[in-house]
Amino acid sequence: MRSRRFVVVLVLYMLGSGGACFGFISALHKVEIELANTLGLEASASPGAVAEALWDSMTFRNMITHLVGDKDVAKEVLAIPPLALIYGWLAF
């Protein structure tokens, strides 16, 4: 903990992961705005509203279940918020 290298690596990791999450949220919001414009709907002011509705829809859940091939694994994946999945992939 007293090493400068540890502190520098920790700061770089925090900046990188925070920047990646911010980038994901910004990209998600832009996609949602374009999707709302394409469908002729009112765009949401907060990012993630469309993604949350999609995540909760039965059609999307069935698609993920068929994509994964195992219903139990699909339930576990769908229980995790999309941002946590992206962050987990990034950390991996």
Image: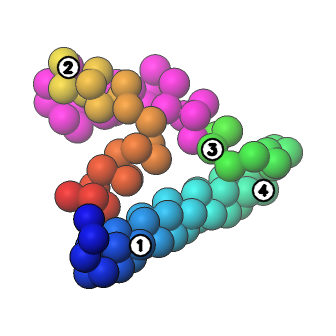
Magenta stretch: give its range.
Answer: 51-71
Separation of marks 4 and 1 at Cα, in angstroms: 39 Å
Mark toward the start of the polypeptide (4 vs 2): 4
Q: x%, y% of residue 73?
A: 18, 26
Q: x%, y% of residue 76?
A: 27, 25
**Which is more foreground, mark 4 or mark 1?**
1
Q: Amino acid at mark 2?
A: Lys
Mark toward the start of the polypeptide (4 vs 3): 4
**Which is more foreground, mark 1 or mark 2?**
1
Q: Is residue 20 visible?
A: no
Q: Which residue is mark 4?
A: 37
Separation of marks 1 and 2 at Cα, in angstroms: 39 Å
Secondary structure mostly seen in magenta is helix
Q: Which residue is mark 3?
A: 48
Mark toward the start of the polypeptide (3 vs 1): 1
Residue at 82% over, 48% down: 45
Asked which secondary structure carries label 1, the reply is helix
Residue closest to the eye, 5 or 21: 5
**Which is more foreground, mark 4 or mark 2?**
2
Q: x%, y% of residue 31?
A: 62, 60
**Above or below for 11 versus 21:** below
Q: Is residue 59 magenta?
A: yes
Q: Residue furthest left?
A: 70
Q: Amino acid at mark 1?
A: Val
**Above or below for 46 versus 66:** below
Dot 1 alpha-carbon crowd within 10 angstroms: few under 14, some 14 to 19, many 20 or more:
few
**Which is more foreground, mark 4 or mark 3?**
3
Residue at 58% over, 57% down: 25
Q: Which residue is mark 1?
A: 11
Residue at 46% over, 20% down: 58
